[in-house]
Amino acid sequence: MRILQLSNKFVYPPKDGGAIGIYNYTKAFSALGCDVTILAMNTTRHYTDISRLPEEIKKMADWIAIDVDNRIRPLAALSHLIQNRSYNIARFISTAYNDRLIELLHQKEFDIIQLEGLYLSPYIETIRAFSEAKVVMRSHNIEHEIWERIANNEKGFFKKWYLKILAKQLRQYEISRLNKYDLVTSVTERDAARLRSCGCELPIHVCPAPYDETVLAPDKTKMEYPSVFFIGALDWMPNAEGLKWFLDEVWETIHQQIPELKFYIAGRNAGSFHFEKGKNIEMIGEVENAYDLMNSKAVMIVPLLSGSGIRVKIIEGMALGKTIVSTTLGAEGIPCKDGQNILIADTPEAFAEKIIKCVKERIFFSIIGDNALQFAKRQFSSHEVTAKLLEFYKKHISLD
């Protein structure tokens, strides 16, 4: 099968949940015998020197990167606000990217063109003009829902007002595009139901974000127990919002009861996140190998208050046998069970209580982590998830 993936970021090295999800599909498609091409925007925020790709990565796909400057510009944002057009979407509309897409569609034929998220939707018209391929929207989440939740959590009057407008504009755009594809995939059953409720009439296949079982290997021999850690892109608004809540509302209670316990924060663009230093909090920042960091610490937290889709970091944490404490929203879309393979808490008191229990009861801590590992193996193996997706594609290609 000839597959073209369109991405609004270059996904190697895979350093955040979105990039990991896209990259794992690229790798799995290649391993299953597909001819894969990936046309990616090389943005200022996620810039990669493509000439330095390792040889084994180059062999997986035909990698094409187009420089796109999508930095936020206040005047452009104001102009789109006045015109009632989504600036979230406009930032990813690039003449250079569109021209390279046209050139590519003249050079090669594809069976499937997979749009990696809503921000690639503006290129549908170009694809229709130059290709007969089936166009698939791989919906990473319900984009407008993320912004609605962020707006609802915002306390400042003017910022809340502006965020609500952004969410409304994004909702209008997302719904207007729903039936312009040929097929849709979602990462959760819940997201599939939301897409249908918004008016999607296309075939939808639920395929979660897979993890690469050849890379993730649990190793508790060097684990610092007890310890608590957070890992995630610190410039992604839901991560920053949730981490601030944890530091302001939860950590003080834990620190008072277990003053020697350390809390580690790791993630890209640490300079964008500000917090009160001290109280056994250590900012690690960006790490070379996220899985080594995760294996080296004990209790993983996912204190999300907004967002949508599925948390790739939870899946990876489970695949590493981590004991995870998350909010209900953080674990949304993952069919896990509180008290069995994850711990769920939505109030500061409950969140602190569950972390303290993991620290004071090591057997309990170990049981949750071991159950998480078995759960991940059954649900999210990349080979199995991708093979099912390809069967879905073959079914609909054969209809012609």
Image (cartoon, helix red, strand yellow):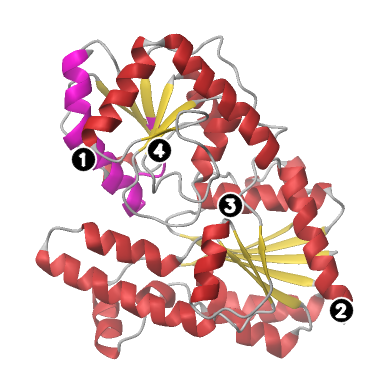
Dot 3: what SS?
loop
Q: Amino acid at mark 3?
A: Val
> Is there any visible trace of residue 84 in the rendered image?
yes
Question: At which x and y percent is residue 19?
Answer: 55, 51
The quarter in which the N terminus is drawn is bottom right
> Is there any visible trace of residue 9 in the rendered image?
no
Q: Is residue 247 above or below residue 190?
A: above
Q: Which residues are magenta?
A: 230-257
Question: At which x and y percent is residue 339?
Answer: 45, 28
> What label does residue 399 carry, if any?
2
| Circle nearer the N terminus (4, 3) | 3
Q: CA distance from mark 3 to mark 2?
A: 32 Å
Which of 17/94 is in front?
17
| Circle nearer the N terminus (2, 1) | 1
Dot 2: what SS?
loop
| Circle nearer the N terminus (3, 2) | 3
Eye-nearest disc, 2 or 4: 2
Q: Main secondary structure of the magenta part?
A: helix
State the residue at coordinates (66%, 76%): 101
Q: Amino acid at mark 2?
A: Leu
Q: CA distance from mark 3 to mark 1?
A: 27 Å
Q: CA distance from mark 2 to mark 4?
A: 45 Å
State the residue at coordinates (65%, 24%): 217
Question: For mark 1, what is the residue?
Answer: 274
Q: Amino acid at mark 4?
A: Gly
Label 4–label 1 contact, CB within 8 A? no
State the residue at coordinates (80%, 77%): 107
Which of 373/17 is in front?
373
Dot 1: what SS?
loop
